[in-house]
Each structure stands twice: as C-alpha cells, then as structure tokens.
Image (spheres, grey):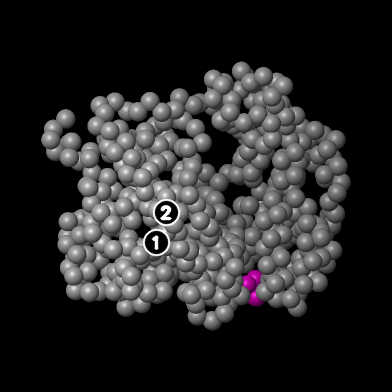
C-alpha cells in the first residue's frame, strides 16, 4: 500500500461514516472495492431528486442564505469558500463544507445565532431515526473541532399532519427538533468509531462479516449482490409471514428450505416449502369455489395508480398522502354480457382528483361487486376521496362496502404456485396463472416506475415525450385490471 493509499484510507466523509455504522464490510467495499457495488436504480435516482426538492424548501426556513456550490466543485474549494463566507459574517449558509482530523462533512443549513451557530440537518422522512442522530453528531464533531462555536443541533423533518391550504407554508411543513443534548451524548462514540473505521480501511482483506438484517437497516446496502451471492433459490429467505424467520434460521446455520424443521413452520409456510421442494402447485378447490361464489353482477375490476410526495401538491393534501392520478376499470353487467373497459389518466400539471372520482362514480354501477388486488390500498384511496369530496361520501361508502379482495386466496395460500417464492403480489401470481400476460416486456413494470413516469410527464414540455409516457402508463394500468379478469377466469377452471 502506497503512502497515497494510506492517506486516502484515513480520510472519512460523513456518508462513509454512516455507512460504517451500518456495516464495516460495506465501509471497506465502498472505499477499497467500489467496482463490486450494485447499480443505482431509477427509483433511487428519483428519491435523491425528491430529497433535493425537500432541501430547497427547508432553505426557505432561513431565507437569504448563501449556497456553497458542490456539484463538480472540488472539496478543497468548497471548504475555502465556506471559510471565506464565515469570515465575511454571512449568517446563513446552505451546504457549507468543513474538515477536521481528516473527516469531511457538509451541513444542510448552518445558521448563526446570538450564542453561536446552529446545525440544521434536513430529512425528507416524517419521523426521527437513530441514524439521523449520528448524522448530526459527526457534523458537530467536525465543526467543533474546526473551531466553530456550535450553540445547538437540530433535525428538520416533514410534518405529515400538515394539510396544504394555498401556498406551501414551510413553517408548518417542517418540524424543527432540537437534538443537542442527545447528540452530545454520542460524541465519544463518534470519535471511537472514526478510529475503528480507519483501522478497518487499513486491512488488506475484506472484513469477515456475514449477511444479516443490517444489510437492509437502516438502508438497503448497495453491495448486497456481492455479499449475498451464496444465497440461491429455495433459501430460507423466501419464507414469508408468521412462523419461521429466514434471518433466525440462517443464524442457526440453516440456509436451504429442505433443512428447516417442520415444527418451526406455520401451516402456510408448510404449504410453501412442500410446493417449492416438490415443484408442485397447491389449490384448495373448496376455498377457491367459496371465493368465486361470493362474487356477483355487475362485476367490476378496479385498479388505481397513485403518486406521493413529501411536498403536498394540492390543497387538502398531506405530505406522503397517496394521490390517485389514474385508474383502469373492467365491467361486466351480467353473465352473458361482454366486458367493457374504462380508463382515466390525468393530463400533466392538473389536480386530477375531482375529475377522476366523478368519472369513476358514473362508471361503477350501484351495488356492483368491485374486485381489487390488495383492498387496503384501494379502500385507503376511496376514504381519501370521502375527505376531499364529502358530497360523494354515500356513493363511495357503497363501493367500499362492496369491495372483494382478489389477493385474499393467494395470501391465505388457498392458491399457491411454487414459483411464487413466498410472494402473493399480483406481479408474482399473474404471469404464472396467465402466462400470456407479463410485466417483463412492459416499458413500465411496477407502481414505482409508474409514479416516476407520471412525475416526468408532469414536468415535460415535449409533446412527443408526454404522448409516449401516457401510452406506457395506460398500457401498464390496463394490464393490472385485465390481469385480474384473466385470473378469475383461470380460477373458474380449477
């Protein structure tokens, strides 16, 4: 190892420190073997974008501040510019950069008060997590070490009870919580951890740390693909629901489903394990028949697509509230009738809620049987509509009372196809029950992709791009409801 390598391994950034708190192996791989990292997903990229948006709104809590540029700006230059602004007496800085003891941090908002500077760490979450305390603690360690008088440390996070009424009120959108006391209690720990991490980074070999819950807590690690490569199909991590837990079994040295003691499994898990090992499917024909007999005409199949945002987009909405922008509906009025198809997708940049619910209420007949997949989600959306438009409460209540959950027989293992791998999502069940229908060849493959596509469409000024996204969204949402129609038809053949 060269002197340059040794100096590099002694350098610790805030993000690297937080990674090390989660796992020393991830810390080491990030610094020494970055080529083993998994690719950042499209959904993660969009999450980063939303985080930046939240940060911009939080800066309005302390207006007229100076931002320290950081994109494509060397760390050394960021530190120099920060120092210059502080010397000039600038009261508020956004994204200032500091270093001490070869530890580098950036602060979301630094605001000077009468007794010193306040650290304001902005989070797009709606609750405080332990990792956030350590996030602020390492900032405090560096700023104090660099000679800056720190009077208090704060977390700034989303108030999910805030209801928008007019322009965004940032004083109500955010909660500012003083965590100075609890943060100071972590200071000795921070100092020791930094030195421990540096020792890890000096090693020639990758730390011998096994997989565990820490791979996903507090964040999904981007080295899971490397660390989990010894976990193959038919592993204990496919077990879902009550009963045996994959992590607990793994700690006991049990990796494969065939080695799990039967007495540890719930009844549903026993069905899953038996079907998986014998490569067979399980159909409880009696229960499936009971489910089918519970349906009636008119028969509707309904699916909503929604988006959510930490910044409530419309009056009457809250942070992270699911906002429906699209639905698809198949309707069959009697046993001899043909299916009719209805759909709605809002135009970019408008509040779609009233138009959507009024159209839907016209298309679902009174007392229709309404089939959905995962009724808690669809019922939650319909309840929100009651709050937004109380004049439709009675009609919406009728729909809610008539909802049948197609997920139920799959969740209860009345239908279990061994290739579902413990999942009962429609994405797992549909391609197995109806092989000609699959999400794999779709441009949009899941709800998260649909939401991000909708955001892109809403911001786009390119008519051809908007039309392309609309087409993809309509095809995706239609497949969800068509899939339910075909699944019920397939179930009638059991």
- 157 over 244 or under it: above or below: below
Q: Quadrant of residue 164?
A: bottom right
What residue is at 37 percent from the left and 74 percent from the top?
Answer: 62
Q: Nearer the viewer, residue 335 or 424?
A: 424
**Label for residue 183?**
2
Q: Is residue 268 visible?
A: yes
- 197 over 88 or under it: above or below: above
What residue is at 44 percent from the left and 27 percent from the top?
Answer: 210
> Which x, y percent locates residue 285?
82, 34
What residue is at 69 percent from the left and 31 percent from the top?
Answer: 243
- In the image, taking residue 352 as reference, residue 388 lies left or right, namely right
Q: Nearer the viewer, residue 95 or 258?
A: 95
Kindly state the secondary structure of the residue where label 2 is placed: helix
Q: Which residues are magenta?
A: 352-356
Residue count near mark 1 (Cα–Cα under 10 Å), binned few <14, some 14–19, many ≥20: many
- 405 over 267 or under it: above or below: below
> Which x, y percent locates residue 242?
69, 35
Are discs 2 and 1 less than 8 Å apart at CB?
yes
- In the image, taking residue 46 as reference, residue 366 lies left or right, namely right
């Amino acid at each position: 190892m060269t002197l340059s390598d040794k100096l590099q391994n002694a350098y610790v950034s805030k993000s690297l420190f937080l990674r090390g708190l989660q796992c020393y192996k991830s810390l080491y791989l990030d610094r020494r073997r970055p080529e083993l990292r998994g690719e950042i997903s499209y959904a993660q990229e969009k999450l980063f974008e939303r985080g930046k948006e939240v940060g911009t709104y939080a800066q309005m809590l302390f207006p007229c501040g100076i931002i320290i540029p950081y994109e494509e700006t060397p760390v050394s230059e960021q530190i120099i510019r920060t120092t210059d602004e502080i010397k000039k007496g600038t009261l508020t800085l956004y994204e200032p950069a500091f270093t001490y003891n070869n530890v580098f941090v950036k602060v979301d908002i630094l605001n000077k008060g009468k007794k010193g500077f306040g650290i304001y760490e902005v989070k797009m979450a709606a609750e405080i997590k332990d990792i956030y305390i350590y996030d602020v603690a390492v900032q405090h360690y560096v700023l104090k070490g660099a000679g800056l008088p720190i009077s208090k440390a704060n977390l700034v996070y989303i108030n999910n009870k805030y209801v928008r009424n007019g322009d965004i009120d940032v004083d109500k959108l955010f909660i500012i919580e003083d965590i100075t006391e609890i943060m100071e209690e972590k200071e000795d720990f921070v100092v020791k951890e930094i030195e421990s991490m540096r020792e890890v980074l000096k090693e020639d070999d990758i730390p011998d740390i096994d997989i565990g819950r820490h791979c996903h807590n507090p964040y999904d690690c981007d080295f899971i693909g490397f660390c989990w490569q010894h976990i193959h199909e038919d592993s204990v991590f496919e077990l879902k629901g009550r009963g045996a837990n994959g992590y607990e079994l793994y700690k006991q040295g049990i990796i494969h489903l065939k080695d799990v003691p039967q007495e540890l499994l719930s009844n549903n898990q026993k069905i899953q394990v038996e079907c998986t090992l014998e490569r067979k499917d399980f159909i409880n024909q009696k229960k499936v028949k009971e489910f089918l007999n519970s349906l009636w005409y008119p028969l509707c199949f309904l699916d909503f697509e929604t988006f959510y945002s930490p910044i409530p987009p419309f009056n009457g909405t809250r942070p992270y509230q699911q906002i429906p922008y699209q639905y698809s509906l198949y309707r069959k009025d009697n046993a001899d009738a043909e299916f009719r198809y209805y759909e709605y997708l809002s135009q970019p940049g408008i509040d779609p809620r009233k138009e959507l619910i009024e159209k839907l209420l016209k298309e679902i007949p009174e007392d229709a049987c309404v089939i959905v997949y995962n009724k808690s989600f669809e019922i939650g959306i319909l309840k929100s509509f009651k709050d937004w438009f109380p004049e439709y409460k009675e009609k919406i209540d009728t729909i809610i009372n008539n909802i049948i959950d197609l997920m139920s027989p799959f969740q209860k293992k009345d239908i279990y196809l061994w290739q579902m791998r413990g999942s009962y999502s429609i994405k797992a069940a549909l391609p197995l029950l109806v092989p000609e229908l699959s999400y794999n060849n779709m441009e949009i493959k899941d709800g998260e992709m649909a939401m991000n596509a909708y955001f892109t469409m809403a911001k786009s000024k390119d008519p051809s791009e908007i039309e392309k996204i609309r087409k993809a969204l309509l095809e995706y949402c239609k497949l969800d409801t068509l899939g339910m129609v075909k699944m019920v038809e397939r179930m009638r053949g059991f």
